[in-house]
């Protein structure tokens, strides 16, 4: 457990992690958001194959059921559970969190993976611009609502998924990151910038969460990771030359969902990590390559910005984190 002095998001030099390092995860409970396809599906499949009980939290239940069937066919006997989760609806987030809490007295891994990228302008059910509402606020709320179950599991982890795009966010202050006068993003909308700011928010959330966990001497750590340029449905809003089925000009710069899952799995499982790390592909611009701990942008380490975003996120979601809640760790079976 970090003592809070760990330099969060800084390069530790560790690299070369692969699926061979996953190890036996029998008896552990893992919740993976966006697990119906792409990188989230691969993370869920690997965890299920290693013996973990995996909760697939998916927006599209039909795709979620298909994902469960695919994993079960590959890993007979895997313990899989499907929960409906639409991160663009705080009502759905609360319902999903309640279902998870009612079923599992303790959670070992929460992988906040789901997201949208470069989407045309849309507004969530709660009136937030889609990227901010889904990628950050939805995960902020979910994590806070199941935090007591994470605190019940010694050695538990939260993995927040970011992107190299966070470096493109032109942010000097909270007002640049979250425009409280324009939460719906109706003025001056730029899809690339909206995505970049949401991915910066994921890092700010991860680092502030880890610091608060460390200050509370909690048995849980938080880390950040990103899958690089993985060939998944997430890219469906990119220009046609840069997406499937052949992936056109982008193919030499991208890698498979299986490779994209490795940084997330390393962040979730590598016992050498102590919390606050940023795990990313090792290649040029972090597009592809073996996972290793990298350095995120300077603004992502702005502690004042981290704290201010946290307070605003509490206000917007109505969710506050209780770092003292400690249900008994005994009784790891479903209720």
Image: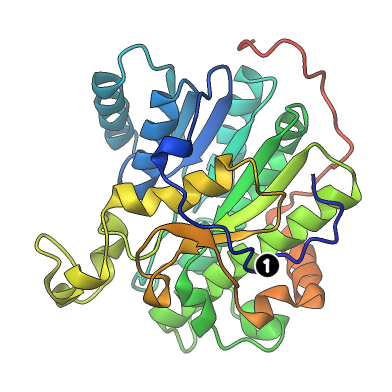
Residue ID at (65%, 59%): 277
Residue ID at (59%, 27%): 100
Q: In this view of the protein, which residue sits in the foreground, 66 or 161?
A: 161
Count of picture labels: 1
Residue 110 appears in the picture as rendered: yes
Question: Would residue 142 be found to the left or right of residue 289 on screen?
Answer: right
Pinpoint residue 211: horizontal percent, then vertical percent: 81, 57
- For the C terminus, the image quarter is top right
Pinpoint residue 152: horizontal percent, then vertical percent: 77, 27
Q: Residues within 10 Å of mark 1 (few under 14, many from 20)?
A: many
Pinpoint residue 320: horizontal percent, then vertical percent: 79, 49
- For the N terminus, the image quarter is top right
Say if 327 sits above or below 184 in the image.
above
Residue 59 appears in the picture as rendered: no
Pinpoint residue 49: horizontal percent, then vertical percent: 38, 25
Say if 49 sits above or below 266 in the image.
above
Q: In this view of the protein, which residue sits in the foreground, 32 or 46?
A: 46
Is the image coloured rainbow, by chain, by secondary structure, or in one colour?
Answer: rainbow
Question: Would residue 266 be found to the left or right of residue 11 on screen?
Answer: left
Residue ID at (72%, 85%): 173
- Residue tagged 1: 204
Say if 55 sits above or below 178 in the image.
above
Residue ID at (25%, 27%): 70
Q: In this view of the protein, which residue sits in the foreground, 107 or 125?
A: 107
Q: Secondary structure at mark 1?
A: helix
């Amino acid at each position: 457990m970090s003592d809070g002095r760990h330099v969060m998001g800084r390069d530790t030099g560790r690299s070369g992690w692969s699926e061979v390092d996953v190890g036996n995860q029998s008896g552990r409970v893992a919740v993976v958001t966006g697990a119906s396809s792409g990188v989230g599906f691969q993370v869920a499949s690997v965890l299920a194959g290693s013996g973990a009980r995996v909760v697939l939290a998916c927006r599209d239940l039909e795709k979620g059921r298909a994902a469960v069937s695919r994993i079960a066919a590959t890993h007979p006997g895997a313990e899989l559970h499907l929960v409906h989760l639409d991160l663009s609806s705080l009502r759905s987030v609360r319902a999903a969190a309640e279902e998870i809490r009612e079923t599992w007295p303790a959670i070992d891994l929460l992988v906040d993976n789901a997201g949208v990228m470069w989407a045309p302008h849309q507004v969530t059910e709660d009136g937030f611009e889609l990227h901010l509402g889904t990628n950050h606020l939805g995960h902020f709320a979910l994590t806070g609502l199941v935090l007591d179950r994470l605190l019940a599991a010694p050695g538990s982890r939260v993995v927040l998924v970011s992107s190299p795009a966070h470096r493109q966010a032109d942010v000097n202050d909270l007002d640049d990151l979250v425009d409280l006068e324009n939460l719906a993003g109706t003025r001056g909308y730029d899809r690339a910038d909206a995505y970049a700011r949401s991915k910066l928010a994921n890092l700010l959330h991860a680092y502030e969460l880890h610091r608060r966990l460390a200050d509370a001497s909690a048995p849980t750590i938080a880390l950040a990771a990103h899958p690089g340029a993985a060939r998944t449905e997430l890219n469906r809003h990119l220009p046609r030359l840069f997406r499937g089925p052949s992936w056109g000009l982008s193919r030499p710069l991208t890698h498979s969902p299986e490779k994209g899952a490795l940084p997330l799995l390393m962040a979730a499982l590598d016992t050498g990590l102590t919390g606050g790390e940023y795990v990313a592909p090792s290649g040029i611009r972090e597009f592809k390559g073996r996972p290793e701990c990298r350095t995120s942008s300077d603004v992502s380490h702005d502690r004042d910005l981290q704290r201010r975003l946290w307070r605003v996120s509490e206000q917007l979601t109505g969710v506050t984190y209780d770092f003292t809640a400690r249900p008994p760790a005994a009784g790891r079976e479903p209720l």
